[in-house]
Image: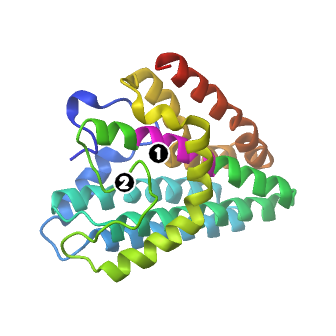
Amino acid sequence: MSKLPQQNQFLDLSDYGRPIARLIAQSLKNTSFTPIHVTLMFIISGGIAIACIFNGYHWGTVFFLVLKSILDAADGELARLKKTPSYTGRYFDSVSDIILNLMILLTVWHVTQGSLVYTLFAFFGLQLQGTLYNYYHVILRNKYHGDTTSRVFENETPKALKGEKQRDVNILFGIYTLLYGGFDRIIYKMDGNAVESKNLPNWFMTAVSTFGLGFQLLIIGLLLVAGFEDYIIPFFIVYSVFIFIFIAIRKMINP
């Protein structure tokens, strides 16, 4: 099952793991495995990828970063297959992502002996890129009645869905707001009118999907394999310029 109806889907360059993710979800549909279990598996995969970076096993890094991306898609697929959407899973997934992203970049900084300041700038840029992509994607999902556990404006604690505890939602939403709230506010400030867009063309969404986490992790892995680990931090700083370019294009499409 997809986050968007078939007729509104676009080529998502960050979602290359979706076909395998669907197979994994199908295989777990009638088991006791929950989406949270799959999220825990992607955390483990991300941790192994970090260990591979630290020890110079670059092909291993690529494998486990790609596996992490696949499992990151599989938890949501499993939730939709089992008809068990939850805010607990949604926020736990996002919180896990941002912590892993920071740890990955800090590990790259450690092995390259680069600048910590530039690394933090790269992390800021990487997260802002992902926030813009998710912002546009969630607008589409809400507009075309797709998956709605992600909301365009995450400004108040949602009511727990069936099968989850409100206390868990409250705690995870609080952590999510602490970690993501600043990035969300920046993007809303830069392009708050996007929610009124009549159309976000498929070609545009495909271009913006290069900001998606799956694509970002793939870039990190490929640069490591190619021996360009020193360029990972500068890449994400420079590529952040496209945040302004994509927003400008969006405003030209839908003034």
State the residue at coordinates (50%, 19%). Answer: 255
Q: Position of residue 162 (x, y in %)?
A: 18, 72
Q: Is residue 85 visible?
A: yes
Q: Quadrant of residue 3?
A: top left
Q: Quadrant of residue 72?
A: bottom left
Q: Position of residue 153 (x, y in %)?
A: 44, 51
Q: Secondary structure at mark 2?
A: loop
Q: In the picture provided, is 97 more to the left or to the right than 202?
A: right
- The dot on residue 150 is 2
- Tally the marks: 2
Q: Nearer the viewer, residue 91 or 97?
A: 91
State the residue at coordinates (80%, 65%). Answer: 110
Sequence order check, earlier mark of 2 and 1: 1
Reply yes or no: does residue 112 show up in magenta: no
Q: Position of residue 187 (x, y in %)?
A: 58, 43
Q: Nearer the viewer, residue 170 or 141?
A: 170
Going by the numbered disc 2, the residue's amino acid type is: Ser
Going by the numbered disc 1, the residue's amino acid type is: Asn
Residue that numbered label 1 is attached to: 134
Q: Secondary structure at mark 1?
A: helix
